[in-house]
Amino acid sequence: MRNVFDVLEERGFIDQVTHEEEFRELLGKESITFYIGFDATADSLTLGHFLQIMVMMHMQRAGHKPIALLGGGTTMIGDPSGKTDMRKVMTKEMIDYNASRFKEQLSHFLDFSEGKALILNNADWLLDLNFVKFMREIGVHFSVNRMLTFDCYKNRMEEGLTFFEFGYMLMQSYDFLYQYRNYNCIAQLGGSDQWSNILGGYELIRKLEKGNSYGMTFKLLTTASGTKMGKTEKGAIWLDPNKTPPYEMYQYLRNTDDRDVEKFLGLLTFLPMDEVKRLGALEGAEINKAKEVLAFEVTKLIHGEKEANKAQQAAKALFAGGTEEGSIPTTEIEKSIFDDGIGIIDLLRKTGLIKTNSEGRRLIEQGGITIDDIKVETTDKKITLDDFNEGKILIRKGKKIYHQVKCK
């Protein structure tokens, strides 16, 4: 079996690693225990989290033991990384409920049978810590001057950073130390925005335990346009089918930018890399076949093959000339109109879906307009040819009113 480090590198996951050659060699010769943390800030994981889950699945398939750490304790504060203001303080009951939902979802992807993987909750060791004892044992090893050079804190200095949040790095570092001591966990993995937090725990273990520990981060799931697909972005794609139905997830992935197809196939599927490269090299209208494979494979992994088939059939019925398509009102518009883009409100008026601009603004602000099942978030959105699939888009007004737009 290939070294999982090489697999992750080839598929485009790896961003930064401590002691890269040493860690790679270790992964190739023995089974290790590693962890990834999930703060319970919502009642479902997202497609952004799924990238981390894929890493855990790759690692487990290679014989390594994952710990999925639920952040029942750290969510009480909230990670300032990548945030422009302080995270909303949540009740313990809400956090516990969210953590239970995460546990259920993670169980679909990882084998938690005896000795294969663990689910832990850092509330079990963080909530009853003695502050003075904690600061004497842990806080003494952290330099405030150095912490302020990390992006997660530096970027917040002008907006205001509370001591409440400043302690987050200490808590996450202690998580790593606790699991090292109690579960022989020697590596922490996470998104690239977690690099400074991971370094904190890695250094703490080496100082207090004189032991070998490792950290590795992965590139965040972003589009070619720089948009982050994640837990804090508007319009997040949730793994819970009640929040994001399988068809909507399928359509979201089916609408992937041409430039992202190969990258997402490598990160979010288990297709062999030869096939990933073949599909990614398709051009023109052919690239749509690769997008369909991407949408089907990811939906299958998350929701099962039955739901993926249903989503695929529904999409083909609407966009490949199926019988249902004929019953959908359709407006044909000159292709040149979309060269420079047309405002969403102007397009809604052309199709007759709205009578006034104010009606259009109100609908969009209330989340009542979707294009190919992706909610329109702003009233100034422009529709261009990039938004079309095989010359068509499907606009939905409210829950039941559909209108198809075709280029001619």
Image (cartoon, rainbow, N blue to C red):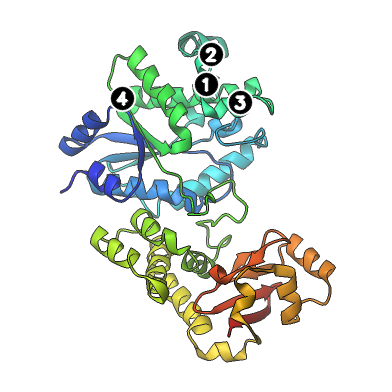
Badge 2 crowding class, 10 Å Cα cut-off, few under 14, some 14 to 19, many 20 or more, is few
Q: Earlier in the sequence, mark 2 or mark 3?
A: 2
Q: What's the residue type where badge 2 is placed? A: Asn
Q: Residue at x 52, y 38 (%)?
A: 39
Residue that carries the numbered disc 3 in the rendered image: 165
Q: Tell me which amino acid carries mark 4.
A: Ser
Tell which circle, 2 or 4, labels the residue nearer the N-terminal end: 2
Marks 2 and 4 sit apart, C-alpha to C-alpha, by 24 Å
Q: Which quarter of the figure has residue 324?
A: bottom right
Instruction: Please tell me how crowded label 3 is: few (under 14), some (14-19), or many (20+) other residues with Cα within 10 Å.
Output: some
Disc 2 target residue: 145
Say which residue label 1 marks: 149
Disc 4 or 3, which lies upstream in sequence?
3
Q: Give 202 or 341, whichever is nearer the viewer.
A: 341
Please name which of the two marks, 2 or 3, marks the residue nearer to the observer.
Answer: 2
- Left or right: residue 187 compared with residue 137: left
CA distance for labels 3 and 1? 15 Å
Q: Amino acid at mark 1?
A: Thr
The quarter of the image holding the C terminus is bottom right
Q: Nearer the viewer, mark 2 or mark 4?
A: 2
Q: Residues within 10 Å of mark 1 (few under 14, many from 20)?
A: few
Q: Establish if 63 lies above or below 404.
A: above
